[in-house]
Amino acid sequence: MFKLPLLLSVLPLATVFSSAASVQVRANHDCASIQPPQVPGAEVLSVMGVELTVDVPPFPPSPSKLNTTVDVCSVNVTLTHMGVNDKVVVSVWLPLPDKWNGRFQATGGGGWAAGEFALLMGPAAVEGYSSASTDAGVSVDPASADTWALKEDGTVNYDLLENFASRSIHDMAIVGKAVTESYYKKPANYSYFYGCSNGGRQGMVEAQKYPDDFDGILAGAPAIYWPELLAATEWPQVVMQTKKTFPSQCVFEAFRKAGIAACDKLDGVKDGVVSNLDDCEFNPFALVGKKIDCGGEPTTITLAQAWVAKKIFDGPKTTSKRTSWDVLPVGAYYDALANSTIENGVPKIFPFVIASSWIRSFLKKDVNFDLTTITYADVPKLFKQGVDEFGKIIEIDSDLSALKKSGTKLLTWHGLADQIIHPHISIKYRQEVERRMGDGSKVDEYYRLFLAPGVTHCGTLGLNDGAAPIDTLKVLERWVEKGEAPETMPAVATDANGATTFTRNLCRYPLVPRYKGGDKNSADSFECAKDFGSHH
């Protein structure tokens, strides 16, 4: 049996698989004899299969607590789209027949990577799913699109952007389900999509454009409104550069904790978590003059630092002085979007790489563009340019008529302390869908949203103040397969060792978790209600 370390498998897969396929071609006839799938608008260039034993470390949503291994038939399908001259790799992992649970799970990407490959496919295989991931014909680098965004003549490569935006996910669904049927000699009983961040965006796009690809779609912290989102995430850097003030993460952490303390009790209980963002009002200037300890070095918070924190919270403004986008919620960490560095003793901005790549390559068409030249007045222009130039390709739409008709279920969730994608994005989209498709109860028949107080981007392990959702795919499966529409979603908070510290039941939007008394560490002490009561 050929053994592939998990992290190795996120490298360009064609090289790995082609070297292994010849070794295994006689060892497993079924795996090496997968029929080429039919993909509309594309030509399949090659299909290579090999049996692998894969090391899988614990990673959500896998229930595995220890490192484990899983045997899979790994199939690599390479295709090209007519007239595009691209080369797309779709990887499909198939548990051995006696381990298959009868379901197919397509997996999403993160950042500028359309697929995370083994990072999500490994846990899926452990749970018995056949699974798939795609590189969309672009780089597997999640941090940057600089290597593929522009053609040699300096113009935007719209074909590859379309691959990244939507086309590759639809292709992955077609390829993944076809390869699954070819290997097991029968189609999957149910097909699902699982993704978070960019993967969440991909799921939302599938729900809008290709809902028949899946029976259920799970989209966490979706990076929807892509052009606006990436312009907005540059805002903290513009603020620091303009103010010529670069607070350390220790100082920013003082603001974060003060924000939590100011708004913690608005939900009726002091538990170190902000559940009521709507009524939360935090005044950074209250910390001016406060002395804090930063790694053994005493530091005093300054007025300039407070102005930076306030300006970041306020978000970028349009010319009419109306907030155009929320950037950071109270309780979120600053380090992703408001980072800085020191070069030769001089503090400098350290931009969020995903947003930087969007601005340099797609908006400025110059990978060497100096981000320090962006002003407050430029940010609304970046919003408008992104939507005008690329909205038709990568923007989200609130028309879910096709999803409603298909019977496919869309389950989404978002952490209220997301440090990269403000949760108001998910709320905004849900509200737009309701305005277009009907009231909340009608939309709930096929699309539900759950908000997770105190939870970071995609529930990043070890960073959450709140309880992150667990068994999310199982919740979706019960909705799809048994008709059990979820009213709540189970969630747990853990300490640094992974031990559970408290539990919660996340509420179906627009309901909120109201404290009704008792042990604040128990989910039973909360109920889902229309409001938080008279605590604010």
Image (spheres, rainbow, N blue to C red):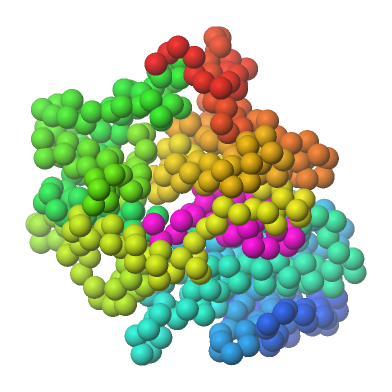
Asked if residue 238 is positioned above or below residue 276 in the image, the reply reads: below
Q: Residue at x 49, y 61 (%)?
A: 395
Task: Give the residues drawn in magenta, as a range.
Answer: 199-228
Asked if residue 534 is positioned above or below residue 172 in the image, the reply reads: above
Position of 400 with respect to 180 (left or right) is left
Position of 428 with respect to 262 (left or right) is right
Toward the viewer: 298 or 413?
A: 413
* Residue 468 placement (x, y as % from top left): 54, 36
Toward the viewer: 119 or 177?
A: 177
- Toward the right, the furthest residue is 185
Q: Is residue 53 visible?
A: no
Asked if residue 160 is positioned above or below residue 464 in the image, the reply reads: below
* Residue 10 placement (x, y as % from top left): 55, 68
* Residue 362 placement (x, y as % from top left): 37, 72
Magenta stretch encompasses residue 20: no
Toward the viewer: 324 or 476?
A: 324
Q: Quadrant of the C terminus?
A: top left
Quadrant of the rendered structure where residue 357 is?
Answer: bottom left
Position of 153 with respect to 68 (left or right) is left
- Toward the top, the furthest residue is 517
**Disc count in the image?**
0
Toward the viewer: 511 or 443?
A: 443
Q: Quadrant of the N terminus?
A: bottom right
Q: Residue at x 68, y 82 (%)?
A: 41
* Residue 189 placement (x, y as % from top left): 85, 56
Q: Residue at x 53, y 67 (%)?
A: 165
Magenta stretch encompasses residue 205: yes
Quadrant of the rendered structure where residue 102 is?
Answer: bottom right
Q: Is residue 230 visible?
A: yes
Q: Residue at x 28, y 36 (%)?
A: 253
